[in-house]
Image: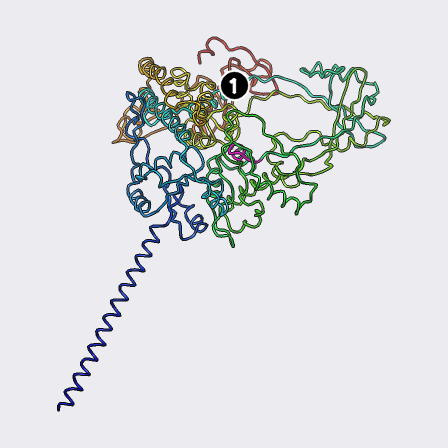
């Protein structure tokens, strides 16, 4: 029994020891797990944080930088001026009163948590004034202490560019921030002070802006110029001549007498030239051979990209910028991950980095030959306020062909990338060369000429020819290769004259492309403002787009009239351009941003007060008509809507009946004799049509008058200060009467 008891004790002790060992092992495992977790936690805290603007940049940049970097997006601005009030302390030297943007609270909470856990916060917002300001606001919003944050920028979202930016961090550029603040404060003051005047004098929902009001004036001025244009008659005369017995004639255009070209203004002058040449022989006066070169185009800036996309791709400016943003932020490409296909899209510089030049040269040499390399780069013409902040718009990797990404991107992305790639490659290629020939013939004292050209070396046009043909607004007029067969000894055979009557054309309506070009030429706005300016004008129904042309609406005319009368300085082209130069001087550090506001505000405030008083009489009231409402029988009133005037029931909201307002102009329809009325297109453009539409389809863009043309009997219309025949081939015009001048 004693032995069994001893054995039992040993067994129990062994079990106890085993349990104890198990517990010790478990404890040791827990301790090890805690240490591992602590190490992981420490590793997580040691990570660097990169903050970008757009969520679409997060994934590719995270892939470039690896696990030691966390990447998050601010989704644009996190602080701004309040919408509910001016948000600028005028009495306290125009100090902005920034608040957290509504809806950004949770995002900021998460960002603060990430920033607190990181050793270093890299502010990687866009490389422009706006991006610099966003980084500056993030420092305050995230409570980042001095020394914890660094500013980095990159012009393209590629692994090389992003990693290189980390090697050259910098401080916040206070000059860039001040320039953005000055623009923001100026725009807020102008918009928040003038808009209430428009609400009181016209209708609620309208707006005015420092740049948009000038753009509207440009469009209105062009419309007035078109309306006032009086066509002038002129003629062209060509002599059809063949040489050395060949049957196919070559058209030689009339130059005039002697060395100075003369224009043919009338039929009588044209007939006199033909009569003077009749029966007399034509002989060769001179044959000149030569050559000319066509330099490659410059790589795209924001403005030229927008213009080219409108012409070549039929993209609107806003569509172009939206697609370009997608290409810049990155798209998934097989074998490369998500990468940005183009460099930063908001730039007014044509500068190209040495790395990109070398990559393009390698590609051109390998695919086209060394002859196609450009030894001398075309220089940009000096423009207004070119900042050269970063590169031209180009492919991030020139070796990535559009054909290689075609099946991996959207159709819009492919077409715009192809346009940018072609343009950049063409800009790095040699000039194209043409052989030229100019031949002059004479008949007595009268000179005629023809010229031709043929390509000797394609150069950059090998890549960009298709795009060039679509873009060029002016067709080639001197590529008649038949001229090359003419020699000084050639015998001339006259086959007849070809005379044509023409009328001068009015200036073309603005398109989005030509408006952007004009704004850039005049120094109005910046690359980042062109698209939102045009979008705002359309959204407010100040302008409308039909086909590609922009037209001002009646509402736009009213707003422009108020701006010109009461705020002439705001819509003055020179003043606006000078203001842009002053904003640039702030960016350069040569001007204080508040001094510009101090100089601007007193005169502007006086204009606002004066407008409040003087424009009281122009407020549009509801005008009661004798037209009964079909639904309730009340007399309908005239309202002013986004597309101009319309009829509405005064019983709103109980009765919501509306009708188009047909304004009779006191002129009979030339087709059916009923009244002509003023109408609007669906997009708000004014025209004149028969009240019996659609039975009668008469319409005119110009206001008809009551009398007929004394020359041909057609109806006549107003054009500026003249009354002209509606038949352009007639060409009759006369001054307005006093009654017509009052219309």
Q: Is residue 623 visible?
A: no
Q: Position of residue 627 (x, y in %)?
A: 33, 23
Q: Is residue 434 left or right of residue 711?
A: right
* Coloring scheme used: rainbow
Q: Position of residue 704 (x, y in %)?
A: 49, 18
Q: Is residue 340 visible?
A: yes
Crowdedness of circle 1 by 10 Å Cα count: few (<14), some, many (20+)? Answer: some
Of 401 and 553, nearer the camera is 401
Q: Secondary structure of the magenta portion, mostly? A: helix
Q: Position of residue 338 (x, y in %)?
A: 47, 50
In the rendered image, which quarter is residue 249 located in? top right
Above or below, comparing residue 318 to residue 212 in the picture: below
The residue that label 1 is drawn on is: 225
Q: Position of residue 604 (x, y in %)?
A: 36, 17
Of 5 and 100, nearer the camera is 5
Question: Can you name the residue that lies furthest to the left here?
Answer: 1
Instruction: Find out whether residue 246 is within the magenta segment.
Output: no
Q: Is residue 716 left or right of residue 656?
A: right
Question: Can you name the residue that lies furthest to the top here?
Answer: 738
Instruction: Find out whether residue 301 is within the magenta segment.
Output: yes
Above or below, comparing residue 268 to residue 383 in the picture: above
In the rendered image, which quarter is residue 50 located in? top left
The region drawn magenta spans: 299-306
Where the C terminus falls, by quadrant? top left
Where the N terminus falls, by quadrant? bottom left
Q: Is residue 739 left or right of residue 731?
A: left
Mark 1 secondary-structure assignment:
helix
Of 683 and 557, nearer the camera is 557
Q: Is residue 422 left or right of residue 738?
A: right
Of 345 and 650, nearer the camera is 345
């Amino acid at each position: 029994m004693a032995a069994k008891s001893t054995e039992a004790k040993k067994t129990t002790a062994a079990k106890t020891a085993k349990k104890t060992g198990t517990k010790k092992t478990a404890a040791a495992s827990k301790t090890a797990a805690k240490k591992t977790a602590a190490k992981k936690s420490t590793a997580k805290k040691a990570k660097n944080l990169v903050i970008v603007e757009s969520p679409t940049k997060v994934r590719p940049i995270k892939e470039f930088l690896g696990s030691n970097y966390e990447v998050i997006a601010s989704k644009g601005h996190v602080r701004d001026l309040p919408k509910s009030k001016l948000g600028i302390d005028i009495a306290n030297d125009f100090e902005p009163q920034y608040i957290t943007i509504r809806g950004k609270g949770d995002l900021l909470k998460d960002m603060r948590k990430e920033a607190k856990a990181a050793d270093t916060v890299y502010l990687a917002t866009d490389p422009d004034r706006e991006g610099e300001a966003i980084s500056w606001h993030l420092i305050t919003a995230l409570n980042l202490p001095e020394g914890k944050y660094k500013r980095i920028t990159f012009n393209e979202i590629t692994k090389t560019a992003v990693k290189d930016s980390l090697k050259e961090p910098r401080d916040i550029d206070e000059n860039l921030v001040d320039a953005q603040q000055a623009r923001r404060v100026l725009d807020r003051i102008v918009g928040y002070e003038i808009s209430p005047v428009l609400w009181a004098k016209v209708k609620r929902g309208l707006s005015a802006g420092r740049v948009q009001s000038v753009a509207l004036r440009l469009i209105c001025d062009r419309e007035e110029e078109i309306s006032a244009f009086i066509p002038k008659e002129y003629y062209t005369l060509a002599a059809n001549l063949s040489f050395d017995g060949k049957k196919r004639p070559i058209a030689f255009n009339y130059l005039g007498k002697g060395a100075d070209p003369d224009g043919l203004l009338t039929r009588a002058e044209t007939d006199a030239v033909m009569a003077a040449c009749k029966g007399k022989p034509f002989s060769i006066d001179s044959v000149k051979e030569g050559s000319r070169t066509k330099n490659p185009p410059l790589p795209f800036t924001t403005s030229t990209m927008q213009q080219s996309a409108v012409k070549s791709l039929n993209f609107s400016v806003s569509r172009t910028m939206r697609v370009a943003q997608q290409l810049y932020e990155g798209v998934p490409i097989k074998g490369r991950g998500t990468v940005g296909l183009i460099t930063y899209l908001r730039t007014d510089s044509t500068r190209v980095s040495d790395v990109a030049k070398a990559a393009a040269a390698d590609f051109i040499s390998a695919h086209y030959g060394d002859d196609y390399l450009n030894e001398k780069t075309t220089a940009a013409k000096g423009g207004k306020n070119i900042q050269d902040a970063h590169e031209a718009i180009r492919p991030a990797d020139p070796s990535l062909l559009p054909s290689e990404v075609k099946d991996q991107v959207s159709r819009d992305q492919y077409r715009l990338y192809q346009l940018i790639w072609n343009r950049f490659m063409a800009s790095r290629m040699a000039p194209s060369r043409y052989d030229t020939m100019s031949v002059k013939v004479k008949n007595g004292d009268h000179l005629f000429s023809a010229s031709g050209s043929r390509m000797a070396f394609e150069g950059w046009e090998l890549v960009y020819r298709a795009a060039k043909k679509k873009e060029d607004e002016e067709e080639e007029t001197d590529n008649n290769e038949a001229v090359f067969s003419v020699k000084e000894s050639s015998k001339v055979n006259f086959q007849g004259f070809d005379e044509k009557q023409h009328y001068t054309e009015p200036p073309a309506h603005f398109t989005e492309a030509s408006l952007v070009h004009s704004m850039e030429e005049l120094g109005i706005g910046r690359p980042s403002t062109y698209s939102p300016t045009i979008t705002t004008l359309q959204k407010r129904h100040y302008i409308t787009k039909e086909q590609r042309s922009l037209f001002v609406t009646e509402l736009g005319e009213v707003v422009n009239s108020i701006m010109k009368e009461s705020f002439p300085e705001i819509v003055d082209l020179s003043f606006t351009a000078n203001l842009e130069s002053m904003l640039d001087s702030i960016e350069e550090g040569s001007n204080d941003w508040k001094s510009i506001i101090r100089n601007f505000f007193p005169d502007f405030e006086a204009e606002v007060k004066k407008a409040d008083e003087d424009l009281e009489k122009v407020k549009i009231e509801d005008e009661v008509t004798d037209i009964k409402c079909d639904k309730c029988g009340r007399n309908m009133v005239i309202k002013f809507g986004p597309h101009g005037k319309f009829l509405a029931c005064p019983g709103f909201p109980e009765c919501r009946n509306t009708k188009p307002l047909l304004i009779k102009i006191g002129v009979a329809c030339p087709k059916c004799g009923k009244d002509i009325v003023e109408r609007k297109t669906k997009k708000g453009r004014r025209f004149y049509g028969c009240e019996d539409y659609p039975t009668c389809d008469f319409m005119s863009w110009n206001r008809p008058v009551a009398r007929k043309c004394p020359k041909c009997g057609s109806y006549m219309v107003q054009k500026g200060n003249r009354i002209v025949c509606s038949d352009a081939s007639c060409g009759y015009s006369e001054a307005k009467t006093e009654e017509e001048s009052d219309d």
